[in-house]
């Protein structure tokens, strides 16, 4: 019995501010009003169109501090260490990730098989065999008294991981702009795509922002462009 995961990415939005639009609107208005933020907050009704009108203008003029007040958190599982390593490169995100020091992977560790390998029968079988051999050696080391923190040295990039990841809206937009680009690796594109979808489901006004950078800015600045938008 193998422990491979294919298409098992699970992303759940676990928290976001209830009054997202009102908070951003307040941040925007505070910059341009003689009134105090409390006065503005109290006089603000829930006129979505009016709030969105100002917010859209402020974001498009690059006044991004206004969207840093919005923090969202996700529970993410079924991704590979290769994928999580790319996510943790984003320096304005916060992470709590399953530890390979404290959580023993004895028996058979779970792993993610990239689709391109699943689609190649011969390589797929070899891949599974390689994982099984790795797992047996890992278990042998643990059974011989090696600590998980040292035995993990042989766990592959394919090993499955889970994490709670939090970030503000400015960083989420940046993350989507970079990682939804067709130049990004398939697994991280899927993961970030799910992060975007979860939030758009409840905040549809964010749809134009949680897209690849070319969709947002209308041109491509990648050296090897996919041709979706004209080159910069
Ligand atoms: C398609 C693709 C291929 C990649 N290939 C490689 C690779 O081969 N090798 C590799 O090492 N990485 C690679 N990366 C990772 C990339 O170099 C970045 O580390 C990662 O995308 C995080 O992006 P960032 O630095 O813009 O954003 P974040 O860390 O999310 O930061 C957001 C923004 O904050 C600002 N910022 C953050 N920290 C600083 C700072 N210290 N100084 C100044 N400004 C700061 C910048 O404006 C930055 O854009 C790749 C990324 C992509 C999308």
Image: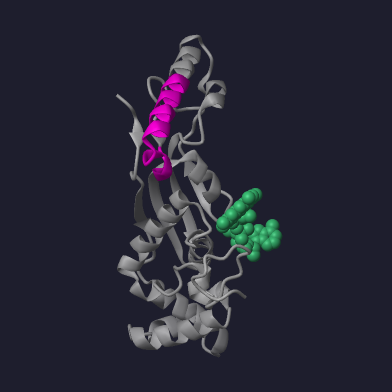
Q: To which quarter of the image does residue 129 belong?
A: top left
The residue drawn where x is 58% and y is 78% is 62
Q: Is residue 149 magenta?
A: no
The single residue placed furthest to the top in the displayed view is: 144
Q: Quadrant of ligand 1?
A: bottom right
Q: Is residue 126 magenta?
A: yes
The residue drawn where x is 34% and y is 71% is 203
Magenta segment range? Answer: 113-135
Q: How many marks?
A: 0
Can residue 144 be seen here? yes
How far across and down, in percent of the image, does residue 42 sit? 39, 82
**Colouring scheme applied when the structure was drawn:** one colour
The N terminus sits in image quarter: top left
**In the depicted structure, whether residue 220 falls above or below residue 82:** below
The residue drawn where x is 53% and y is 18% is 147
How far across and down, in percent of the image, does residue 166 sit? 47, 54
Q: Nearer the viewer, residue 138 or 45?
A: 138
Q: Is residue 16 left or right of residue 67?
A: left
How far across and down, in percent of the image, does residue 59 sit? 52, 79
**In the depicted structure, whether residue 132 falls above or below residue 171:** above
Can residue 39 be seen here? no
**In the depicted structure, whether residue 43 falls above or below residue 102:** below
Specify the principal SS of the magenta part.
Answer: helix
How far across and down, in percent of the image, does residue 227 sit? 52, 69
The C terminus sits in image quarter: bottom right
Q: Nearer the viewer, residue 136 or 38?
A: 136
């Amino acid at each position: 019995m193998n422990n491979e995961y294919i298409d098992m990415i699970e992303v759940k939005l676990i928290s976001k501010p209830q009054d997202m639009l009102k908070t951003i609107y307040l941040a925007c208005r505070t910059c341009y009003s003689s009134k105090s933020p409390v006065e503005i907050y109290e006089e603000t009704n829930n006129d979505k169109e009016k709030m969105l009108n100002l917010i859209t203008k402020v974001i498009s003029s690059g006044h991004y501090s206004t969207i840093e007040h919005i923090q969202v958190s996700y529970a993410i599982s079924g991704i590979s260490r290769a994928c999580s390593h790319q996510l943790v490169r984003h320096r304005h995100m916060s992470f709590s990730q399953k530890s390979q020091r404290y959580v023993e992977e004895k028996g058979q560790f779970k792993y993610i098989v990239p689709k391109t390998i699943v689609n190649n029968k011969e390589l797929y079988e070899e891949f599974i065999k390689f994982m099984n051999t790795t797992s047996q050696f890992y278990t042998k080391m643990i059974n011989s008294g090696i600590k998980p923190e040292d035995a993990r040295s042989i766990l592959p990039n394919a090993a499955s991981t889970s994490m709670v990841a939090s970030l503000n809206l400015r960083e989420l937009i940046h993350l989507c702009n970079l990682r939804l680009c067709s130049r990004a690796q398939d697994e991280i594109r899927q993961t970030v795509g799910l992060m975007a979808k979860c939030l758009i489901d409840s905040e549809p006004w964010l749809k134009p922002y949680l897209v690849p950078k070319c969709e947002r800015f209308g041109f491509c600045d990648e050296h090897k462009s996919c041709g979706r938008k004209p080159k910069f």
